[in-house]
Image: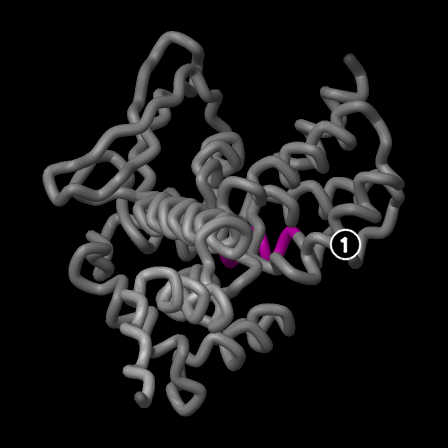
Amino acid sequence: MIKVFMKIFCFLFLITPVLKSIGQTAVPPAFDYKRDFKAILEKTQDRGSELSYQKLLIRFLDRDSTLSNAETLALLIGFTEDPKYKPFEDMGTEQEIFELNEAGNIDEALIKAKAYLQTHPLSLKVLNEASFCYHSLKNKDSADYHMDLVDKIMGAMIYSGTGKKPETPIFSLGLADGESFIPNIGMKILTKDTDWNQQNLFLEIIDASKSGEDHINYFFVIEHAKQKIDDDRVNEAADKKAKKGDKKGKWDKKDKDKKNKKDKPAEEPAPQKL
């Protein structure tokens, strides 16, 4: 019980700057997922663009104070094109690291977190867990570093939408990032669900509460994650079909020649000379 209390206390202490930024966010967000996602994604894949994914990632990891919420959002969007982005599998790995921390296996959790962040540097959940690991090990500099990155991602998510209506959802890189976002703003998750909004965008819907008696719905857009999962399943099915064809249905030239010989009518014998 003491361990759980300490984790909550340490986390709220480190996340305070994010809570303050939420209170200051009164201007409607400039980002519209339906309108802007593809255009921003294209720019992140252009190495000559100021929104180039690689350029933004370097600034993010360097804790560049001039990196704006809009640029951090572009960075998150850019990662959806990374081959390492596997939303369904990623969710399982992130939960495993979280559970290691919950069980008090701090060293093992940190080893897995560091390895995971090498390929998934924008994981909100694992950045949270890495910060907690370092805090538990009394490594304040590393704990602060990872929490600063959490702050950047939280700021970008808050910039992306109010989350209070299906039409203005918060951008969520992973399938379950909303489930990290809600505790980060000091609220408790009551229920979780998914649905489509009027723009046909797939959303995670979280019923959250401050006191346990109030209910506030938060909407997180995860359309890109769903699309990625669907594409992967299609590709996986195609791969399986191709492999099956290699074993049973694939003809080589010899097979074709055999069929031609079998189907070709027998030639009439040449007339014999008298």
The answer to whether 166 appears left or right of 234 in the picture is left
Question: In front here: 252 or 57?
Answer: 252
- Residue at 32% across, 75% down: 269
Highlighted range, magenta:
147-154
Q: Is residue 151 visible?
A: no
The answer to whether 204 appears left or right of 15 in the picture is left
- List x then y, in percent, for residue 110: 81, 45
Of the 4 image quadrants, the one containing the N terminus is top right
> Is residue 120 positioned above or below 66 on the image?
above
Check disc 1 and report its element: helix, strand or loop: helix
> Is residue 193 positioned above or below 126 on the image?
above
> Is residue 87 positioned above or below 77 on the image?
above
- List x then y, in percent, for residue 42: 32, 75
Question: Which residue lies under the disc numbered 1?
Answer: 114
Question: In front here: 235 or 111?
Answer: 235
Question: In front here: 54 or 187?
Answer: 54
- Residue at 80% across, 17% down: 2
Residue placed furthest toward the left? 198
- Residue at 20% across, 52% down: 28
The answer to whether 247 appears left or right of 142 in the picture is left
Of the 4 image quadrants, the one containing the C terminus is bottom left
According to the image, what is the colour scheme of the structure? one colour
Q: Can residue 51 be seen in this view?
A: yes
Magenta segment, principal secondary structure? helix
Answer with the quarter of the image where residue 175 lies. Answer: top left
* Magenta-span inclusion, residue 133: no
- List x then y, in percent, for residue 179: 48, 32
Of the residues shown, which amino acid type is indicated by label 1? Lys
